[in-house]
Image (tube, rainbow, N blue to C red):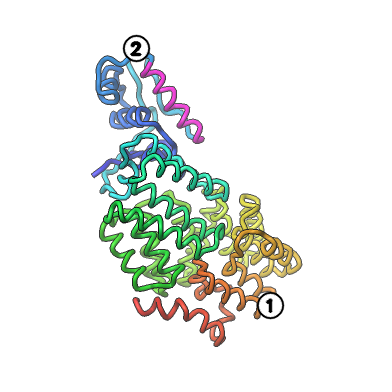
Amino acid sequence: MTTLYKFANYTFDAHAGLVFDGQPVHLPPKEKGLLQALLMARGQIVRKEDLMVKVWGTNETSDESISRTVYRLRVAMQSSGGPEVVETVYNSGFRITAVVREATMKESSSLNALTHSLRPNAIAALISAREFLARQSAGDIEAAANAVRLAISLDPSYSAAWSTLAEIRVTQAVRSLRPPREAGWLAKEAAQTALNIDPQSASALAILGWVRVMIDQDSERGMDDLDRAIAIDPDYWVANLLRGWALQAAGRLEESVVMMRRTLELNSVSHAVNSILALYLMYAGRNAEALELALDLAKIFPTVDNSQGIASILASVNSMHDEAVAFGMEAVELSPHTPLMQCPLASALAFAGRHDEARVVLKAIEESTLPQPSAGMAPAYLALGDRSRAIALLQDASERGIPQFAWTRNDPRLAPLHGDPVVERIWARIWTAQHAIA
């Protein structure tokens, strides 16, 4: 069991570290240990003598060393945008000024594995990689890949680093930053390396399973991998998230919603989990719930492109056309060079009857050097009245293994295509296979 501390919009636990407003805050080991000691005291003053023993393991640490560590902790917390909560009580020690709440939770072996390296510099590189990955932009994702490759070069037996590299490849596939089958192959290669090092790596198994289901359309093997991952580590939120994707693809819509709610229990501050839950509620026909959640997320995560994009989709589906366009424009402004993030705006404009503007956005997407997000473009073309182009895009999405293709059958924007024999055959490539394991 491990203890989760919540205070002043921060969360902290010894394994996952410090998070502010959903974003990780990097703390070196001494600063991390100092913060944990102060949180354990729950607002009571912790004397310097006690910190020496708890953090440094000795009673001979200098006052200057303690003061420098406190200073670096404050700088790290404030640089995240968070409030100053570490107070110096002169001639006494230090304390946390915010109200501290505790929750005891089961430990996730997958999260613990992030620090399973004998090379501190490899651990630091991996933590940096995950910080970059959380930002989601194309540049940050590439920076994450460079950081995790550094971690691997420092410690080739670092299983969590290989799993993180696989996760980065999955992110590139999802955000259409790399051809999905290429990204999927690279993800499987990295995940398999992690499993060769640690056969019980739930994170590697989950990624391997997701790629098999969503990109390779190998449903039986993929779901087996996902089930094994959750059996190994039922509290690993990413495994639950990825299994939710597979359930939705299988047409098990209510089960996918339940799975995403379970994932939220494990990581309530993840914008990705919240956003996907909003989509899955929509796919399950629960539009009112989906819209409410999406609009809340757009306010809570104003700088996250995906939250704005999904708010645009939900607003458009609910005929809130002006709002849909505004959210879509915000998503594009946040990620102007990511074609996937232009798709909600193109769709919102098309459904709002602003066809010329929609075509301008679609042209920009098609002229990008990045892989075309065909599944996301299909609703816009259908709303423009170009049914044949929409169907061709679905065919392309299926053939190229675009992960979001599995969502298209339940997308209400594509409802007019139901019953079309050509489209039904396209959907059957994954749909029939998925139902075989349902």
Q: Nearer the viewer, residue 57 or 129?
A: 129
The residue positioned 64% from the left and 67% from the top of the image is 347
Name the element at disc 1. loop
Quadrant in the rendering for residue 387: bottom right
The residue positioned 60% from the left and 58% from the top of the image is 341
Q: Which residues are magenta?
A: 65-81
Tell me if mark 2 has few (under 14), some (14-19) or many (20+) residues whose alpha carbon lies within 10 angstroms of its own.
few
Residue 422: percent from left, percent from top? 56, 85
Q: Which residue is mark 2?
A: 91
Mark nearest the camera among 2 and 1 is 1
Extreme residue toward the right, this view: 356
Would residue 435 appear left or right of 1 to someone viewing this image? right
Work out whether residue 318 can be spotted. Answer: no
Q: Label 1 sits on what residue type?
A: Asp
Q: Which mark is residue 386?
A: 1
Name the element at disc 2. loop
Q: Which quadrant: the C terminus?
A: bottom left
